[in-house]
Image (tube, rainbow, N blue to C red):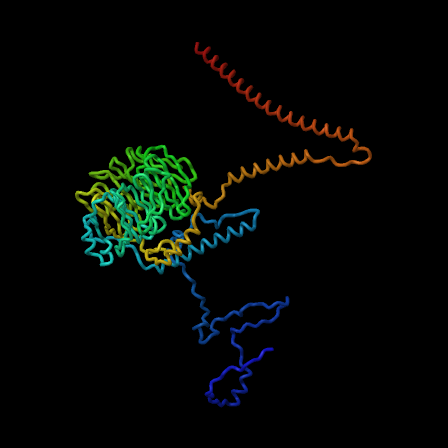
Amino acid sequence: RTSFKKPRTHSRSLPSIAMPKEKAAGLGKVKPPEEVIRLDLGDDGEVPLERPARTKGSGKGEGKGEGKGRKDPKTKAHKGLRETMQKYSRGASSKGLKVKGDKKLATKVKQRAKADAEAAFRLAKAEVLQTAESGYIQTESNEDTRRLTQQDILDSTGVGVARKHFSFNVPYGPYNCSFTRNGQYMLAGGRKGHVALLHCDSMELSCELYLKETVRAVQPLHNHLMFAVAQRKYIFIYDNQGVELHCIKMQKHPLHLDFLPYHYLLVSAGDKGELTYRDTSYGREVAEHKTRLGPTTCMRQNPKNAVMHLGHTKGLVTLWTPTVKEPVVKMFCHSAQVTSLAVHGNYMVTAGSESKWKVWDLRMYKEVHNMRTFGHAPSSIDVSMKGLVSIGHGSHFEVWKDLFSTAKPKRPYITEEYPSRMIDCVRFRPYEDVCAVGHTEGFGNLVVPGAGVANFDSFEANPFETKNQRREREVQTLLDKLQPDSIMLDPDKIGGLNETVVKEWKKEAAKKAAEEAKEAAKNQKATKKMRGRNKVGNRMKRKGLAEGKGQREKAKDRDGDEDSDFDDEDDEDDDDDKGTREGGGGGGGGG
């Protein structure tokens, strides 16, 4: 039972309006406007949903307003929207892919293509909200940017940028530097046993270790709470308070460390030519390869496909994946030892001890640029997120611009000198216009305008993340962790279909099914026949006839194969005889 209540009305009553009787009587004869759609039943018994056409000049005023019959304005697409969508596209599109014989799979493929296109479109539209832009040094007409010192750059920048420049003189060098993924923390390790973890903005030390042992490499793991140190004999894992968590004794004398964030794999290379992959989420060794090329001189990862690039003493650069025991690619890059390398997208930069450094195109494995340094051979190379290449050779530091997009540049973008010091490591800070330099007497930061990406994805790496955001991101990355089998040269092949393998599999399946059917027919019991045909003698007779037929078929097949072999041999003999006769005839003619 439902009770209805009257709606509340205002206590103040509205004044009554007297209306003439003529107007009140005419209210029932109001003509409906033209926009009203009449829903009359048609001849077929259905309602035709059609709007009556508007004639020109039927509105208010003649030839004006809505009576003019103007159309709705057409929306125009943004000029650079297609190029922006291409930038955010996820590899080869499956829009034109046709699936035959499986409607369910075809529907899924169609939905996936639609979702990818919608994601790229939304990302392209969201670029309007990204107001920050990365800028470079703008000089006057004929002024050279390489003549600008760090003091000149700092005088032209704000206080926030000037605070990022610092230099520490510590007598435990040379120093190896590395950053966390979001660029919040910097990890520095001196060859004589000094390790320091500090916050890049507040310059607060999280921990400082004096190990009294040789430190060859340092590497932060998934965040600043854990980092690995390659010491004289083993690899040690520490937390952000400097407490030793683990000691990895499986690989001795490590030289280089790297971390794959999407796979949670700690990769190490030693002086005995061993490459080891270890999963840091549960602490087990995933793979171990022996390069058989002597000590590894340098090692870096390709962020695009997680393939490891290793440099060797004979000028070779090899590319490795966890699932393949041999190098997937082997390149001869230098005529001497490879001292350093770095990878950026489809390009690789290598440096050799013959004072040369080169740029390679990984799509064709061909050389693009060939440069030469002066004074000393390059000791370290790194590439920023925007494609700037930094090189340290001797006491000289150089940054090159537009190496991957234009022709060979004539001069560097920025230079800096470290007199009476030798540069050992250069690393760009993610999402910042900063480059860390480690040398024999300490380490510090240099300001390099245009090196970092101005707009960052907070779900990928947030430079300003809080404690709760860090926890959530750690759990999410563990849930989304990729398997080591997904590491390959061409990541676009993941989820694809190899038609050759499918054809071979179908052929083997059909052959196996035919053999099973033949075996089932052989073991099938004879049908029961009436009127004396199912006697013992008749059954044995039919069985013998079937066996004889099978033997004759096998013999025919065997004889056919032998005849083909004999025919091939006869053809070869005939060819030999023909060649002998021709040779003899030629000799007789010559005599």
Residue situated in front as seen by the camera: 57 or 337: 337
Q: Is residue 173 visible?
A: yes
> Residue drawn at (29%, 45%), measured in percent from left and top?
382
Q: In the drawing, does residue 94 fall left or right of residue 1? A: left
> Residue drawn at (29%, 41%), measured in percent from left and top?
216
**Quarter of the image containing the N terminus?**
bottom right
The percent position of residue 117, horizontal first and vertical second, equals: 45, 54
**Quarter of the image containing the C terminus?**
top left
Q: In the drawing, does residue 35 fall left or right of residue 405? A: right
Instruction: Classify 277 as above or below 475.
Output: above
The percent position of residue 222, horizontal first and vertical second, equals: 36, 50
The percent position of residue 56, horizontal first and vertical second, equals: 48, 71
Residue situated in front as seen by the camera: 325 or 212: 212
Q: Residue furthest top?
A: 591
Q: Is residue 390 visible?
A: no
The percent position of residue 570, horizontal first and vertical second, equals: 56, 19
Q: In the drawing, does residue 142 fall left or right of residue 580? A: left
Q: Which residue lies furthest to the left in this view?
A: 420
Residue situated in front as seen by the camera: 314 or 412: 314
**Hey, which quadrant is residue 523 in on the image?**
top right
Instruction: Classify 555 as above or below 333.
Output: above
How many marks do you count on the picture?
0
Residue situated in front as seen by the camera: 410 or 12: 12
Instruction: Classify 12 as above or below 318.
Output: below
